[in-house]
Amino acid sequence: VERPVPADSAVVRKPRGRVGKALSPYLLALPGGLWLIVLFVVPLIAMLSLALQTGDVLHGYTLTWNWAEIPNQLKEHHTEFIRSAWYAGVATFICLVVSFPVSYWIAFYGGTKKNFFLLLLLLPFFVSFVIRSLAWQFILSDQGIVLGPLKSIGLLPQNFHILATSTAVIAGIAYNYLPFTALPLYVALERIDRRVVEAAGDLYASRRAVFMKVVFPLAIPGIFAAFLLTFVPAMGDYLNQQILGGTQNTMIGTIIQNDFLINQDYPAASALSAILLAFVLIGIFAYSRILGSRTIEEYI
Amino acid sequence: MTKDQGPNIDPALWRGLTQSRFSRRQMLKYTGMGAGAAGLAAFLAACGTKGALPAGNGSSPLPNTGIGTSAWWDKQTLNKQLEFANWPYYIDVSHGKHPSLDEFTQKTGIKVDYREVIQDNNAFYARISPSLSGGQPTGYDIIVMTNNSPPLGYLFEAGWLIPLDHRKMVNFNKYAGPLVKNPTWDPGNKYTMAWQSGYTCIAYNTDEIKTDITSVSALFDPQYKGHIGMMSDPQELGSLGLLSIGVDPAKSTQTQWKTAADKLQKQKDDGLVRSYYDQSYINALKNGDIIISQVWSGDIFQANLSGYKNLKVVIPSEGAMLWTDNMCIPLYAKDPLDAMTYMDYVYQPDVQAVIEDYNNYVCPVPAAQNVIRDQLKDPVVANSPTVFPTADMISKTRAYYTYKSQEDLKAWNDLFLPIAQ
């Protein structure tokens, strides 16, 4: 369903010598542009600059163009980067598998109650992220309300535990980020033109064929948007790991947090953040190269 | 849909794969970006990050020369107001008010603005240091910093605390206990007076562990594999490691740190440790996820009071770490004399008793014990050895290592932080 792209007015209309006319697009972009510059570009540059500084928190840091910090940190913490990508990837996959049927059902069969179902999907978000994770810590504890009874009737060995394993961390991430996956998927499925679906039926496509050849391909941009919106924050997540994880589940977010707050090694923390950012940006560029950047705006 | 339509590939990808990559317009754009990058480099160079001391020169004159001398103190007057920054749940509360503060206001006319704004030493330091390095008041007259965390040392080293007026420390000199008088981290109480102290020791679940635990070696016992809790804070973790190899942390050397770190690493690699906890270890202990852990004494005391009688706290034979939260007056404070007045005021036994009966940490005023027992009628707190330590416990008390330089601190953190993460 390609729609005609409106012609760019700045290109079509020649400036008529009036400065105001020429400047107006820029003036209109000014509030948003200033917002981006002050609250995004400046902090970003400050972070990149800090990554290249040396010193300590007491004597301050000076810019010495210490590029070596970046490969050093990458070398020291590559296991945590790989682990974060792995956890975030698995969690995102689980989110996609779980939320696709849900979004599909709401979009196609939700009828007049669609908004109500969406509200239900978002309801857990009314409780803070930390509280929800802590609740899972309580529910899944070794002698807690789930494992305790199962252990006492002998279904599970006494030393079995879920907390402090990678399963717990991945499950926590998948649980917490599910709405980020479900909503873009819902938007993508909702905007599929029903006439196309009906036409496929009229042409004797089976229900399976309709889904595989019409619905699913049209939902692909939504799947990619959902993937990005889930994977990117999950990659930097540190809370689930700290609350639900153990000694072998450290993610890169925790390393960055510790470098900032405990170690107070700001350059190391900035370098790690820069690497994480670069990693994510590469993903987004690949996305926009393959599917076009327009789809991101549409499905958020 | 016909079969010969070919793979369903987004046109954007075809465009991306087939179009020539550089048009003239793009070329111009990239040249502009090059110029921008050069400008960016200049900008990057301009943004250094200020520290407490001038970069590369540790011996420059401290900013508070002349401040805190007797002559300076003589010039100060009471402003009848006090801004007090403290940790949450750290002073007596009754019906939403703080009775001990109200009484102080009644007696002295000094109005106290009590704010529970400190949750973390490092984070709070990060909040006040920009004001101090800019020569501005922090907005607080009293702040409370812990001796086992680096920021208190930063404040000393940068000269950002006002030396106390020892002529006004009447109650302190009379009633302060041996644990907080003339402490290793602040010889002669030049800058600080203790608010409360606490032990970092071990506790275990008596339902699961039937033998009497007396030594930190229990934390390395393979029979508790997977159910041992350790602290994620590098200072706490490292100090315990040192105790376990029989070294007094305060007198330790870098070689001994390495030995301790190796032992802790092996404990982790063998799968003994369930997790490295912050404050959350207490829930893990209550839930039964861990059955023995490094703990803060006050937490276990409170857990016992709230029904978890199966948790037993032990001061191990190797010794227990004593941390102290210290009241101090930051440089440029607006009401230093009011602050000084309050800091000494809380050392009166009957004032301290009210605060202690709520806090249940280690009391800096031993004489408050009788007041709590006889006047407040609370024998549980008065007789608790973790609130009023016995002579035996005092003899087992160990102090934290005091870092000699930033390199020293970094060496410590580089050894112990990676274990906990």
Image: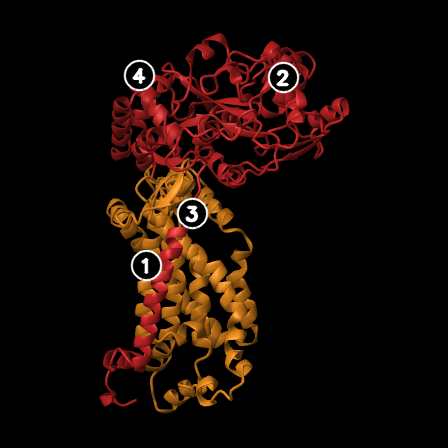
* Foreground tag (2 vs 4): 2
Mark 4: secondary structure:
loop
Type of amino acid at the residue the image marks with label 2: Tyr
Q: Is residue B412 above or below residue A140?
A: above
The number of callouts visible is 4
Residue neighbourhood size for the residue with mark 4, other residues' Cα within 10 Å, grouped as few (<14), some (14–19), many (≥20) = some
Q: Earlier in the sequence, mark 2 or mark 4?
A: 4
Residue neighbourhood size for the residue with mark 1, other residues' Cα within 10 Å, grouped as few (<14), some (14–19), many (≥20) = few
Residue neighbourhood size for the residue with mark 3, other residues' Cα within 10 Å, grouped as few (<14), some (14–19), many (≥20) = some
Image point (38%, 33%), residue name: B57
Q: Is residue A91 visible?
A: no
Type of amino acid at the residue the image marks with label 1: Ala
Q: Position of residue B247 (x, y in %)?
A: 32, 17
Residue B246 image label: 4
Q: Determine the image quadrant of residue B74.
A: top right
Q: Nearer the viewer, residue A185 or B187?
A: B187
Q: Earlier in the sequence, mark 1 or mark 3?
A: 3
Q: The chain shown in orange is which?
A: A
Residue A239 image label: 3
Type of amino acid at the residue the image marks with label 3: Leu
What whole-number distance in Å separates the C-alpha atoms at marks 2 and 1? 55 Å
Colour that chain B carries in the picture: red
